[in-house]
Image (cartoon, rainbow, N blue to C red):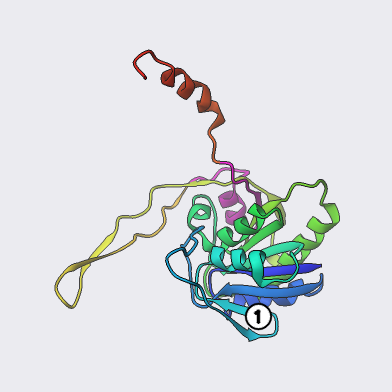
Amino acid sequence: MRILISNDDGYSAKGIRALAAAMRRFGHVTIVAPEFNQSGTSNALTLTRPLQVQEIEPDVFAVNGTPSDSVHLALTGLLEEKPDLVVSGINCGQNMGEDTMYSGTVAAAIEGYLFGIDSIAFSQLERGWLHLEDAAKIAERIVERFLENKTGEQPTLLNVNIPNLPLAKIEGVVATRLGRRHHAESVIREMSPRGFPIYWVGAAGQPKDCGEGTDFWAAAHNAVSVTPLQVDLTNYTAVGAVDRWLSLDTVK
């Protein structure tokens, strides 16, 4: 297999190196990842300047752009052959609920998925890389099970969140749906040394929809959460209503 690995913590982060080591069991691994931390960049592509790519070591490339830039470049010219699998992470911190809309880690996997490639994003729940090697082993097992059971031609997109626990304390691996958070905390206002106001984005909201079956529920019960994602944002239940008000006589 040919496996492409990216992240949003940067090519030198502990998480991506641990993930790459685990994935080498399955085939040839290439890392194409941001030069520096790009957390929270979502699916942004850099369109206002050219991008630079440095080969740091064999099969390790640093891009001065976003996670989506990194995967996009890899798939549209940097790599000689299309990978069979894209994996992203292991992120330093959770990506659950609405986090998936902002996450560069998830975005890297989405970019692979958009190109028709099976893609999986991996994150640890807490920051600090505690029990990272155990998380890498879990990622390896999930990829193994996925490859053994993959069916059909359509690509799969998965979002995986792993507790920062030793393997012996993990309470299983469960399929979940995304939960929901309360609104984010208020911005933090400060004064700059030059006397004008500056603002820090507030912390993410606490879990709101966190019942059984959600990724938040799995996390609270020390289980690994595996959430299948899709990119289609269409609200199909609202299409009929929108069509009706668009058809009013007052609309010309």
Visible residue check, residue 128: yes
Tell me the magenta residue range: 208-232
Query: Which residue sits furthest left?
Result: 195
Q: Quadrant of residue 139?
A: bottom right
Residue 103: x and y in percent read 51, 59
134 within the magenta span:
no
Q: Position of residue 51 (x, y in %)?
A: 51, 73
Residue under the image location 51 percent in, 57 percent down: 43
- In terms of image quadrants, where is residue 177? top right
In the displayed orientation, state which residue is furthest to the right: 148
> Which residue is at the front of the view, 152 or 135?
152
For the view shown, which residue lies furthest in the bottom direction? 57
In the image, is 239 to the left or to the right of 88? left
As rendered, which of 226 and 126 lies closer to the eye? 226
Q: Quadrant of the C terminus?
A: top left
Amino acid at pointer 1: Val
In the rendering, at what x and y percent does residue 226 appear? 67, 53
Report if residue 211 lies within the magenta region.
Answer: yes
